[in-house]
Image (spheres, helix red, strand yellow):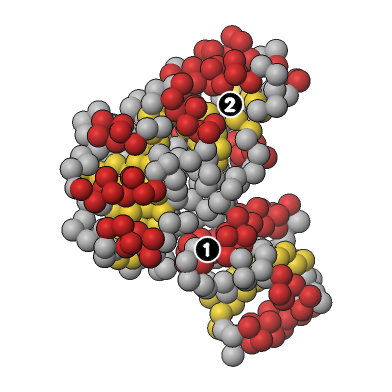
Amino acid sequence: MRGHDRHLAGRDMAAGQGILLQAAAGKEEFMKTLVIKESDPDFAQEMEQAAQVIKDGGLVAFPTETVYGLGGNALDAEASAKIYAAKGRPSDNPLIVHICDPEDLDKVAVADDPRVRKLADAFWPGPLTMILNKKEIVPKETTGGLDTVAVRCPNHPLALELIRRSTGFIAAPSANTSGRPSPTKAEHVEEDLSGKIDCIIDGGEVGIGLESTILDMSEEIPTILRPGYITPQMLEKVIGKVRMDPALMTAGKGQRPKAPGMKYRHYAPKAQMYLVKGDKDAVVRKIQALCQKEKEAGRKVGILCSDETKGCYPYGTVVALGSRDHEEEIARNLFDALRSFDHMDTDVIYSEWFEAPGIGIAVMNRMMKAAGHQVIAAE
């Protein structure tokens, strides 16, 4: 735990409430957000205190293999309401229930389809979320008012330990302000949620950097509602045919979201962002021309590109996601790169198109939402 926070740990964390600081009349109340790290000499005790926060109805941000999650007791309607409030998240946007043992799935969901067990055996613990019909024990405040529940078993030792030590069922969306790029480092969580939640467990940078694949198993044909590290090809090897939801690469207006991230603008930097689509040379020329116009207008421009083209842009702040030969590197760096433009007060961002097989589908899904589906054709 950081030194200036250590003296607050005992009474305040055990109570799961932090310290409420009364602001001026009519203004929001803030709490002292405690940060604990694996390197702390008393980390085991601090983890027990963080688990107690969950038991007492408070909120704890923690690392998973995908992104940092904002956790509360999944079986406590009031805790789920606190998650929505802390994030500024629409209450019809479902939360994901995280479990620490695949055998616990039957306690919160109807899992009688044999394909569900095959998927759990193949991918859990791991970055796959399954949507199933819920059991009564799960309040509708956790499921966004739906009769289905999203469940996954994460593959991160700190996440599993927190779930195991607390209630066994933690509802956890990404630990960021709703609509912002998801957090891949504890610093990102602090930036968005410090003063709004009780505790952050700092486990360093995450491994994957994109949220889990969400597969709707309540449909006759399993349907991917959010692409991720687990690709359609990987799923089909285990259970046969799956389909992609047609709303994945569209604006998704007018629908009620069945899974996180389906309806609302997500992953967005503060600046307006545009994706430039076409063959490589045409994209580079188009972005060069756009950046020249932005420079002449006195605007600060950011460019999101690959390692292969980062030397092609004489104007603007260039951030390279990695080599196009390494999709996983691009995925891992995306959200941190989007946040970096905020710190540079960028006015507008132009990004190369990163369409690719495998996890590249998930990358483009996130980038389309970050850009509000604003695409410029390069000719």
Q: Earlier in the sequence, mark 1 or mark 2?
A: 2
Residue found at the very far bottom of the displayed protein: 379
Q: Where, by quadrant of the figure, is residue 140 drawn?
A: top left
What is the total number of numbered labels drawn onto the structure image?
2
Residue found at the very far right of the displayed protein: 314
Which mark is on residue 207?
none
Q: Quadrant of the N terminus?
A: top right
Where is residue 219 drawn, in percent x and y? 21, 56
The residue positioned 79% from the left and 75% from the top of the image is 311
Q: Can the viewer see residue 91 in this picture?
A: no
The residue positioned 66% from the left and 86% from the top of the image is 281
102 is higher (above) or lower (below) than 184 = above
Whole-number angstrom distance, CA of label 1 to CA of label 2: 29 Å
Q: Can the viewer see residue 193 in this picture?
A: yes
132 is higher (above) or lower (below) than 59 = below
378 is higher (above) or lower (below) than 33 = below
Front-lying residue, 181 or 37: 37
Q: Which residue is mark 2?
A: 199
Where is residue 338 drawn, in percent x and y? 64, 57
Q: Quadrant of the C terminus?
A: bottom right
Q: Are marks 1 and 2 in contact (CB under 8 Å)?
A: no
Q: Secondary structure at mark 1?
A: helix
Where is residue 217 drawn, in percent x and y? 25, 52
Q: Secondary structure at mark 2?
A: strand
Front-lying residue, 270 or 278: 278
Where is residue 232 drawn, in percent x and y? 37, 63
Looking at the image, is mark 1 or mark 2 nearer the viewer? Answer: 1
Side of 91 relative to 176 (left or right): left
The residue positioned 44% from the left and 45% from the top of the image is 126
User: Which amino acid type is marked by label 2?
Assistant: Cys
Q: Which residue is mark 1?
A: 363
